[in-house]
Image: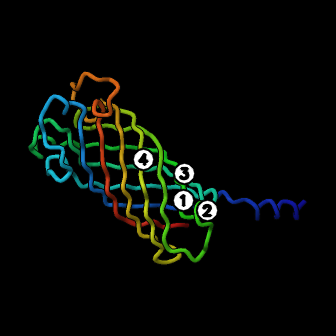
Amino acid sequence: MVSVAGQAQERSKFWDNWFVQANLAGNVFYGSQEVDYDFSDSPMKGFRQSLNLTAAIGKWFSPEIALRTKVNGIWGRTIISEDAETNASKFFTISEQALLDLTNIIWGVSQQRRYHLILVMGGGVGRNMSYDSWATNLSLGLLNQVRLTKRLLLNAELGYVLHTAEFDGARYGGTSTHSLFNEDRQLLLEVGVTYPF
């Protein structure tokens, strides 16, 4: 009995391959209401941009597949003008995401590999705290990771989040219910670190 229990404990992998992430995120916002205005679409415009923090915890179930829970937020934009101060708002999102390590899937698993390209897909909810509004979202991204040491990886992640039109708090929008431009959108460029444990 003791031998069987010991073997079962050795095979248990629940606490293996967890990780935490912390990133600094540059965000660019587009609102559903913009179909009614002639604002510049450039992501380089300051009235669209904000700098935020993201944090995540996740687990690799195999060298190819992981799940993570990610939180992003603090300073956002509700695009109602071309003035950054007028557009300022506060928000957060919580997403559950699947990670597919494309490097391991295409070229096979290697313990010596230092670089990984990872596809990120998921969904979640978001809240605009300035306007007291909730929305659901879908997310898609590419995570680049470089292993610096056994316990430290460098992240560079490019992401796209499609929110329902309630997210930015603006109470008006376009007329097409079948267009991506009738929803709120967010682009993210994140840089940070991953700590596996």
Residue at 48 percent across and 73 percent down: it is 147
Q: Residue at x 27, y 56 (%)?
A: 26
Q: Residue at x 47, y 44 (%)?
A: 122
Marks 2 and 1 sit apart, C-alpha to C-alpha, by 7 Å
Give me the C-alpha separation between circle 2 and circle 4.
Answer: 20 Å
Nearer-N-terminus badge (3/1): 3
- For mark 2, give the secondary structure: loop
Label 3 crowd (10 A; few <14 / some 14-19 / many >=20): some
Residue under numbered circle 4:
140
The CA distance from mark 3 to mark 1 is 11 Å
Q: Residues within 10 Å of mark 1 (few under 14, many from 20)?
A: many
Q: What's the amino acid at mark 3?
A: Leu
Q: Which residue is mark 3?
A: 67
Which mark is first along the chain, 4 or 2? 2
Can you identify the residue that label 2 sits on?
Answer: 63
Q: Which mark is residue 101?
A: 1
- Dots 4, 3 in contact, CB < 8 A: no
For the residues labelled 2 and 4, say whether their Cβ atoms are less than 8 Å apart: no
* In the displayed structure image, the side of residue 194 where residue 47 appears, left or right: left
Left or right of 22 on screen, residue 101: right
* Marks 4 and 1, how far apart at CA: 14 Å
Q: Are marks 2 and 1 in contact (CB under 8 Å)?
A: yes
Which quadrant would the N terminus be assigned to in this image? Answer: bottom right
Of the two numbered discs 3 and 2 in the rendering, the one whose residue sits closer to the viewer: 2
